[in-house]
């Protein structure tokens, strides 16, 4: 186990069966070792600095029906909302004043949000904040829509593939969705020039070690600029309400594997990880993550964007709680970096 970890650290890759053993047989001692190696690599690339992104949840209306997601179409108990353009701009203004230089617009796949409307919002933010990065996380769109978003001034796009195994994909999503289209989207995004993020939920229902190996190999080939890894957490109004959450250990292991394989990738310590366990955010950073995404959404709407139960959105998860976040980072030897934090290819 130790020699596998050391080789992953040196060579940034392992054979599929080696990844399989790492994922199956990593005990607490080896988890600590791989977390320490990953942390060392993150520090070599980013120092003790953690990038922050202001997350604006622009709406929870969604025509998709993903079995894991708390804002899926079939959930009749969700109070639906959409932020209008002016409200989104207010969030950006507040975020900019707090020091954020990346805005992440995230929302459900909402037919009301046409290419036209989204492009208009992007162009307006781009004009008012020329020095800020605009990240989108709005799901699957047409090639043409992605091109228009890019030309309107968006820089980055987050779209987790969720799983690279077609049978597993079908366990997580209704028939109307396909892995093929998800992968087409990711190819488009990269080709168009977005800094592209993908990723998975750790411990999603039906996920096997072999599936994780496939995910790791897919991500190795895609070489995304950003990698989003968080535990699956059940939401009480979904078909997966009774399913167990992903574990802290498996999430930290995967974060470290991705850091060792992708030394300069932007890897967030996710809200889901912070929700899973009180020190989750810190544990993610100590396992090699280098980004956090505090919530910039209007406070009165935050509780409606519940992808899973008990989702953290206040305190150090909140944009207005930056001081608290800074204090918590300082306790583990890190500090907030106020820059845009663009992906920088290896020199
Ligand atoms: N638990 C954890 N993560 C979730 N997501 C959606 N639902 C859940 C859940 N129940 C993640 C998905 C999606 C991202 C926006 O949130 O991976 O891509």
Image (cartoon, grey):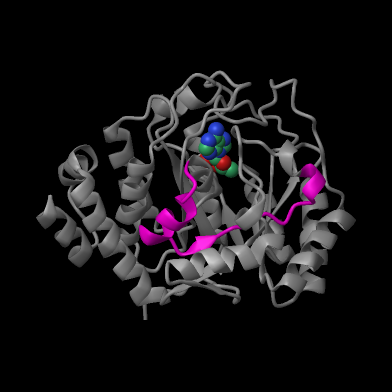
**Extent of the magenta region:** 277-301
Q: Is residue 47 left or right of residue 138?
A: left
Residue 44 vertical position relative to residue 83 in the rendered view, above or below: below
Q: Give the residue displayed 52% in from the left and 58% down from the top.
A: 196
Furthest toward the bottom, the residue is 347
The one of 151 and 77 positioned closer to us in this rendering: 77
Q: Give the residue displayed 69% in from the left and 50% down from the top.
A: 145
Q: Give the residue displayed 40% in from the left and 27% down from the top.
A: 168
Q: Quadrant of the C terminus?
A: bottom left
Q: Quadrant of residue 114?
A: top right
The one of 112 and 1 positioned closer to us in this rendering: 1
Q: Position of residue 46 (x, y in %)?
A: 42, 75
Q: Position of residue 296 (x, y in %)?
A: 72, 57
Q: Position of residue 10 (x, y in %)?
A: 19, 67
Q: Is residue 227 magenta?
A: no
Q: Position of residue 51 (x, y in %)?
A: 54, 68
Q: Give the residue displayed 54% in from the left and 52% down from the top.
A: 188
Residue 123 vertical position relative to residue 137 in the rendered view, above or below: below
Q: Is residue 288 magenta?
A: yes
The one of 290 and 28 positioned closer to us in this rendering: 28
Q: Is residue 287 visible?
A: yes
Residue 134 vertical position relative to residue 347 in the rendered view, above or below: above
Furthest toward the left, the residue is 3
Q: Is residue 222 left or right of residue 87?
A: left
Q: Quadrant of residue 2?
A: bottom left
Q: Is residue 343 visible?
A: no
């Amino acid at each position: 186990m130790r020699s596998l970890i050391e080789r992953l650290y040196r060579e940034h890759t392992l054979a599929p069966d080696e990844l399989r053993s790492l994922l199956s047989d990593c005990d607490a001692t080896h988890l600590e070792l791989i977390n320490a190696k990953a942390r060392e690599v993150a520090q070599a690339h980013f120092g003790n600095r953690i990038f922050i992104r202001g997350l604006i949840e622009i709406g929870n209306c969604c025509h998709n029906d993903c079995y894991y997601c708390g804002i899926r179409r079939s959930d009749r108990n969700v109070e639906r909302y959409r932020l209008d353009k002016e409200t989104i701009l207010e969030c950006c203004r507040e975020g900019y004043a707090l020091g954020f230089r990346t805005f992440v617009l995230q929302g459900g796949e909402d037919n009301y949000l046409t290419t036209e409307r989204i492009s208009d919002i992007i162009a307006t933010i781009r004009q008012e904040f020329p020095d800020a990065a605009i990240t989108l996380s709005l799901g699957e769109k047409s090639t043409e829509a992605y091109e228009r978003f890019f030309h309107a001034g968006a820089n980055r796009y987050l779209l987790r593939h969720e799983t690279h195994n077609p049978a597993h994909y079908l366990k997580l999503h209704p028939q109307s969705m396909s892995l093929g289209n998800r992968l087409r989207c990711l190819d488009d995004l990269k080709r168009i020039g977005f800094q592209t993020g993908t990723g998975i939920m750790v411990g999603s229902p039906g996920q096997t070690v072999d599936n994780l190996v496939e995910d790791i190999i897919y991500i190795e080939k895609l070489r995304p600029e950003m990698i989003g890894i968080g535990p699956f957490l059940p939401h009480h109004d979904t078909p997966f309400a009774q399913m167990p959450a992903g574990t802290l250990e498996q999430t930290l292991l995967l974060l470290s594997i991705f850091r060792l394989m992708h030394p300069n990738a932007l890897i967030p310590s996710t809200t889901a990880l912070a929700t899973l366990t009180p020190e989750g955010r810190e544990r993610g950073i100590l396992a090699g993550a280098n980004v956090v995404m505090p919530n910039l959404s209007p406070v009165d709407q935050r509780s409606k964007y519940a992808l899973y139960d008990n989702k953290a959105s206040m305190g150090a998860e909140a944009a207005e709680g930056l001081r608290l976040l800074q204090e918590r980072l300082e306790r583990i030897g890190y500090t907030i970096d106020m820059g845009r934090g663009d992906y920088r290819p290896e020199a």
